[in-house]
Amino acid sequence: MNQRPHKSSLQLLRYLAVGGFNTVFGYGLFAACNWAFTGLGSYSYMYAAVVSNVVAITVAFLGYKWLVFRTSGNYLSEWIRCLGVYGSSMLIGLAGLAVLVPVLRRNLHHPEQAPYIAGAVIMIITVTFSFFGHKTISFRQKQDER
């Protein structure tokens, strides 16, 4: 019984480490894509968000699978569930960007920074909810595997 809280604490620490890496990776990829897509119009940040999210979700999936939840097999089903968890966060993120970017563009001295600042704010919100989604949906284990 005493091993369970210890195991959960270590899992949470591993999640934070992988999540920290993926947060930096995902945001860096978003910033790079946003810069690369600048010539595609005033909504280029939305294209950047979609592309960077798909890549970052896949990288995060592998990190969580191998290092955090340490599940075996089930790559396709776990990846699909992971996409579901992150996909719902991505939709929330896209909606948040659609609201925050125009507001920030109107209120910042340097409106070109708006997508970068909005992306950082959205990232903080969505990271908060993902651990529980992954623990209970993406990498859930059957009762006898615990």
Image (cartoon, helix red, strand yellow):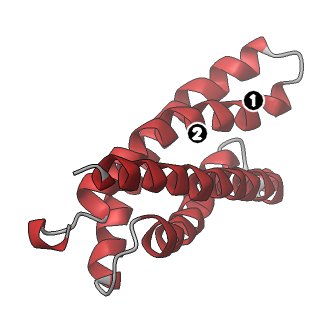
| Residue denoted by label 1 | 114
Extreme residue toward the top, this view: 107
Q: How many marks?
A: 2
For image coordinates 81% across by 16% down, the residue present is 108
Extreme residue toward the bottom, this view: 73
Q: Residues within 10 Å of mark 2 (few under 14, many from 20)?
A: some
User: Residue 140, relative to residue 79: is it above or below?
Assistant: above
Residue 94: percent from the left, percent from the top? Answer: 50, 42
Determine the CA span between mark 1 and mark 2: 14 Å
Residue 78: percent from the left, percent from the top? Answer: 31, 73
Depth check, front residue: 74 or 39: 74
Q: Residues within 10 Å of mark 1 (few under 14, many from 20)?
A: many
Residue 143: percent from the left, percent from the top? Answer: 10, 65
Image position of 141 (left or right of 108)? left
Element type at mark 1: helix
User: Residue 48, relative to residue 139: is it above or below?
Assistant: above
Sequence-first tag of 1 and 2: 1
Could you say which disc has been placed on residue 123 in the image?
A: 2
Q: Quadrant of residue 7?
A: bottom left
